[in-house]
Amino acid sequence: MDRGDAFDPDCPTRVVLDRIGDKWTVLVIGALRDGSLRFSEVRARVGGVAPKVLTQTLRAMERDGLLTRTVHAQVPPRVDYELTALGASLTGPIATLTDWAETHLGQILASRRGYDDAAEAR
Amino acid sequence: MDRGDAFDPDCPTRVVLDRIGDKWTVLVIGALRDGSLRFSEVRARVGGVAPKVLTQTLRAMERDGLLTRTVHAQVPPRVDYELTALGASLTGPIATLTDWAETHLGQILASRRGYDDAAEAR
DNA sequence: GTTGACAGTAACCATTGGTAACCAAGCACT
DNA sequence: AGTGCTTGGTTACCAATGGTTACTGTCAAC
């Protein structure tokens, strides 16, 4: 097993897909695409994320080597988050994905509307 | 709002990202890439998925127009799932992503190991 | 009549995601 | 001395989701 097989549940590739598949991870990477941000800035960019969940996400990403976390001994505290080379290499695939999402959004919503109408007619 | 903005929590693009971000959706699309399959075949290909969850995933994908579900009035029953053009158009972006996952798996696991060792040394 | 295949469903439990409230450190001001 | 302000979280709690196991319906074949 060299590159992993995403269909085997016991293969670690699955773990990677789990992380990428995480909604917040994708958004955080998008937020950090243009440079480092501090905690509250990430929070502001990624609308609607609870601080607890953001902390979890950032720690998991740090653990996986996708970003670095640097604490400045200041008051008030300042913590900067920045993508590593590994994290930055993910921006490409993710951009592909969000592009798809944004261009096909209309089709999906239309399909969903049709489905709802059919349910209503029953 | 034409294409949507994934960073606004109230924007429907978020909904699309949620679906794409779903672990099982990605794997199901991969499984159906080469043609239609029946329920149990999908289940076998996507190792480790519980039938309930697979049903939920497939229904949601049908609702979003990513695949079609055709029931054959037979006994034993036969249900075929097949990607729509919309669903097939997702295989590209997803392949990009799984490629990334499989090639960078080593780096991530290495980073994770280092993190664990550091925690242990404390 | 009972066994077997297929495609689920039902009931239940575990894990996760999310909310609201609070905390710690240091500085400025009173 | 005490109060308030800031940032970057943590804690306790609750709801929603994900997952597991067991069961169901139908009809053909034995």
Image (cartoon, coloured by chain):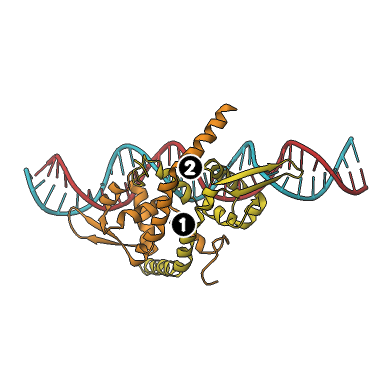
Chain colours: A yellow, B orange, C red, D cyan
Parent chain of label 1: A
Dot 2: element: helix
Question: Which residue is painted at 34% across and 43% down in the image?
Answer: A8
- Asked if labels 1 and 2 share a chain, the reply is no
> Which amino acid lies under the numbered mark 2 shown in the image of this protein?
Ile
Parent chain of label 2: B
Position of D22 compared to B77: left or right?
A: right
Instruction: Choose top left, top right, bottom left or bottom right for residue B92.
Output: bottom left
Question: Which residue is painted at 53% across and 31% down in the image?
Answer: B117
Quadrant (top left, top right, bottom left, bottom right) of the N terminus of chain B: bottom right
Quadrant (top left, top right, bottom left, bottom right) of the C terminus of chain B: top right
Instruction: Answer whether labels 1 and 2 touch (C-beta < 8 Å).
Output: no
Question: Which residue is painted at 39% across and 69% down in the image?
Answer: A114
Mark 2 packing: few (<14 Cα in 10 Å), some, or many (20+)? Answer: many
> Which amino acid lies under the numbered mark 1 shown in the image of this protein?
Pro
Question: Which residue is painted at 66% across and 47% down in the image?
Answer: A80
Looking at the image, which is closer to me, D6 or B102?
B102
Mark 1 packing: few (<14 Cα in 10 Å), some, or many (20+)? Answer: some
Position of B89 compared to B72: left or right?
A: right
Q: Residue furthest bottom?
A: B2
Q: Position of residue B43 (x, y in %)?
A: 30, 48
- Can see residue B116? yes
Determine which residue is flagged by label 2: B108
Dot 1: element: helix
Position of A57 compared to B87: left or right?
A: right
Q: Which mark is residue A93?
A: 1
Decide: is D9 above or below B66.
above
Q: Position of residue D9 (x, y in %)?
A: 65, 42
Report, in whole angstroms, how far the alpha carbon at label 1 lies from the one at label 2. Answer: 16 Å
